[in-house]
Amino acid sequence: MLLRIPQVLTPEELTQLRQLVLGADWADGRVTAGSQSGSVKNNRQLPEELPAAQQARHIVSVALARNPMFVTGALPKSVYPPLFNRYSGGANFFGNHIDNAVRTHAATARHVRTDMSCTLFLSAADSYDGGELVVQDTYGEQRIKFAAGDLVMYPGTSVHRVEPVTRGERLACFFWVESMVRSDAQRRLLYDMDMAITALRRQDLSLINESGQNPVVSERPEVVKLTGCYHNLLRMWADV
Ligand code: NI
């Protein structure tokens, strides 16, 4: 499942985050690459131990935790501390690769299985040319270039690349999520079910409001049962 999560960051957070990271000292992006991906990677990355990186990570982590679409789409068990990269000038692309299956966070020695890869766009889409994230899936290639503050989440099992940036600069945040539900197909089913139940409840509530009834009424038994099915599937599949 490939998911677009709009406006993960507020405009104020975006401005603050950009100011924090753009003024810092950047390094060659190959430091976090495996041997295959290292050979096709040509960008810059913010060293994660820098104070600016720590503050920027905090902004992203807070934004993710309050975002219901991220939480329901990812069912996160563990999130690799967000990293930052930039593509411009001579360091402007990242060729086809699959992310390493397990990332070990150096500072904590904590392992994260990369069920999902995430990119949070931090540059206005019209401020640079190229730089599309291209994700290969069974339907073909998805070319992704979202507005600043929007996030894309896609299965860690996908071959992907970042096209060369030929004008301007593409600044982004990226990280991986280990999900409570390992299977992409199961996560997809749970996500669809959650969205449908939420929509049903919203419709019920608006009908109640229109009719002038007290909104504190018991829910329809069908909705209660469907909600129960969601949780029972999650109970069956979740590894916590
Ligand atoms: Ni990658």
Image: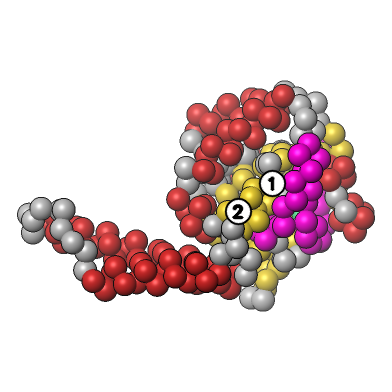
Q: Which residues make up the magenta segment? A: 89-117
Q: Residue at x 21, y 68 (%)?
A: 220
Q: Residues within 10 Å of mark 2 (few under 14, many from 20)?
A: some
| Residue at x 34% of width, y 72% of height | 226
Mark 2 belongs to which amino acid? Lys
Residue 200 position by quadrant: bottom left
Mark carried by residue 80: 1
Q: Nearer the viewer, residue 41 or 174?
A: 174
User: Dot 1, how many residues are within 10 Å of its Cα: few (below 14), some (14-19), or many (20+)?
Assistant: many
Q: Is residue 68 visible?
A: yes
161 versus 123 height, above or below: below
How far across and how far down the image is residue 196, in percent? 37, 67
What residue would you read off at disc 2? 77
Horizontal side of 81 relative to 37 (left or right) equals: left
Left/right of residue 67 with respect to residue 222 in the rendered view: right
Mark 2 or 1: the one toward you = 2
- Which residue is drawn at the image coordinates 72% and 66% (left, top)? 157
* Residue 97 percent across, percent down from the top left: 81, 61
Q: Quadrant of ligand 1?
A: bottom right
Q: Where residue 215 sits in the image (x, y, percent)?
A: 15, 53
Along the viewing direction, whichever of 203 and 87 lies nearer the viewer: 203
